[in-house]
């Protein structure tokens, strides 16, 4: 089937999701977690879709992770009941958390890494007449957030939470090895997965030794889950980008090219002959692709995305989106014969550098099954 037939009537840029690839990716991660003996709590900050969430959990509505209260409310309204809000929360947002729990019967697990924040959470819970489950975040080395693992500060935060009982309930510890993306070699990622595991497990053991229940021991990033040797003592993992994959994952050896399930459909809107050399101009720029170029650290030719045949998703030689403006993407070509190959009005698909930020620009997915445009899935957004 030609690209013109496959995507007839679609305005571009458009977010395309290959459901067959998505389902394979989801099944692979479920099997991986089963083998490791841990619960999968998929992170849906990229997907932001109930349709994707059901595939992630094989049709069930089990535990999930979100990064915004808009996501939490969206999934709670659709029937999900065990939701981890994965960032430390501003006290002003707690009234909304209380509303989501009361309105939808869901429980939101919240994260804290500071005694003052824990105390403010307890005060807010008392004022609202609310109850919140809380995880303490330990920093396993990324230094983005979290307290020192196995430290007296960790224990002190637990003490503040316990003092706010029954309004606050300590549910366990969590950590996140986001710095796993610093490597493209399985060996250091595997070693970091053990650092991540130990930070969480040892912190939980310390809290238990001090008399605090710690039923949840939560870790996870897609690379560390993929390459971990073992996860003894961990109860759950949080990973999300494995569902879609992208060039950032491909460049680090976390996925194969045929695992990338999302792409951006774009139209050729210009042939630029001036400047440094001939270029195709696409209607997918910074807002459609994002300006994240993290994959370029290990894949220098990734640009803002690889340009592919719209029908087959095969890369068009080495073409990449090299420059972006708000609504323009520039693709340098070796010579002007590409202008005949891709005339104005023709469509291509772009494999994203970083799917999380790329997907954030769209309100829905156009879904392919067996290479045929099958349906449209809505997705949420905002905060």
Image (tube, rainbow, N blue to C red):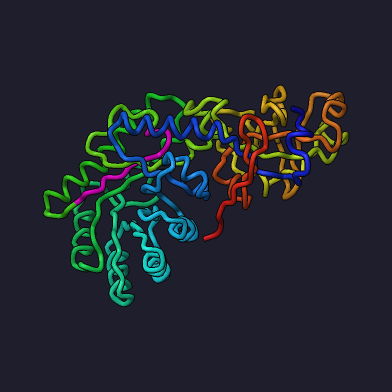
Q: Position of residue 21 (x, y in %)?
A: 55, 31
The answer to which image quadrant residue 274 occupies is top right
Residue 21 vs residue 207, the one in the foreground: 21
Q: Nearer the viewer, residue 117 or 123?
A: 123
Residue 132's place in the image compared with 86, above or below, is: below
Is residue 326 depicted above or below 56 in this figure?
A: below
Question: In terms of image quadrants, where is residue 351?
Answer: top right
Residue that sits furthest to the bottom in the current view: 127
* Residue occupying the point 29% across, 37% down: 38
Determine the residue positioned at 23% across, 63% down: 161
Q: Could you say which is closer to the camera, residue 27 or residue 116?
A: 27
- The region drawn magenta spans 214-225
Answer with left or right where residue 229 lies relative to residue 365. Answer: left
Magenta span contains residue 219: yes
Q: Quadrant of residue 240?
A: top left
Residue 115 locus on image (x, y percent): 27, 63
Q: Position of residue 130 (x, y in %)?
A: 31, 71
Q: Residue at x 74, y 40 (%)?
A: 266
Compared with residue 100, is residue 144 higher up or lower down, i.e. above or below?
above
Does the magenta portion include 146?
no
Can you say which quadrant of the picture contains the N terminus? top right
């Amino acid at each position: 089937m030609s690209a013109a037939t496959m995507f007839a009537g679609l305005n571009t840029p458009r977010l395309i999701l290959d459901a067959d690839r998505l389902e394979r990716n989801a099944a692979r991660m479920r099997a991986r977690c089963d083998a490791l003996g841990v619960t999968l709590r998929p992170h849906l900050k990229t997907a932001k879709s109930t349709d994707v969430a059901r595939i992630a959990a094989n049709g069930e509505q089990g535990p999930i992770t979100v990064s915004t209260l808009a996501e939490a409310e969206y999934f709670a309204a659709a029937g999900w009941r065990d939701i981890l809000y994965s960032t430390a929360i501003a006290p002003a947002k707690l009234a909304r958390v209380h509303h989501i729990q009361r309105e939808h019967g869901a429980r939101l697990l919240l994260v804290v890494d500071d005694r003052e924040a824990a105390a403010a959470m307890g005060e807010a819970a008392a004022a609202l007449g609310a109850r919140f489950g809380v995880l303490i975040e330990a920093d396993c080395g990324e230094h983005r957030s979290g307290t020192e693992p196995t430290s007296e500060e960790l224990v002190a935060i637990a003490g503040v939470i316990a003092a706010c009982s029954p309004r606050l309930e300590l549910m366990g510890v969590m950590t996140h090895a986001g710095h796993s993306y610093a490597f493209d070699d399985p060996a250091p990622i595997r070693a970091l997965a053990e650092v991540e595991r130990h930070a969480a497990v040892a912190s939980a053991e310390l809290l238990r030794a001090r008399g605090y229940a710690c039923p949840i021991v939560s870790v996870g990033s897609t690379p560390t889950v993929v390459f971990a040797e073992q996860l003894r003592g961990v109860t759950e993992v949080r990973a999300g980008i494995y569902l879609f994959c992208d060039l950032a994952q491909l460049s680090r050896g976390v996925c194969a090219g045929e695992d990338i399930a999302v792409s951006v459909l774009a139209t050729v809107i210009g042939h630029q002959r001036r400047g440094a050399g001939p270029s195709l101009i696409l209607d997918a720029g910074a807002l459609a692709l994002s300006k994240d170029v993290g994959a370029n650290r290990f894949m220098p030719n990734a640009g803002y995305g690889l340009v592919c045949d719209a029908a087959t998703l095969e890369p068009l030689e080495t073409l990449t989106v090299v420059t972006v403006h708000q609504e323009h993407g520039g693709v340098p070509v070796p010579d002007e014969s590409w202008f005949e190959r891709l005339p104005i009005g023709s469509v291509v698909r772009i494999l994203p550098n970083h799917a999380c930020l790329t997907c954030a620009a769209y309100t829905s997915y156009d879904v392919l099954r067996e290479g045929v445009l099958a349906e449209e899935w809505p997705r949420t957004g905002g905060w």
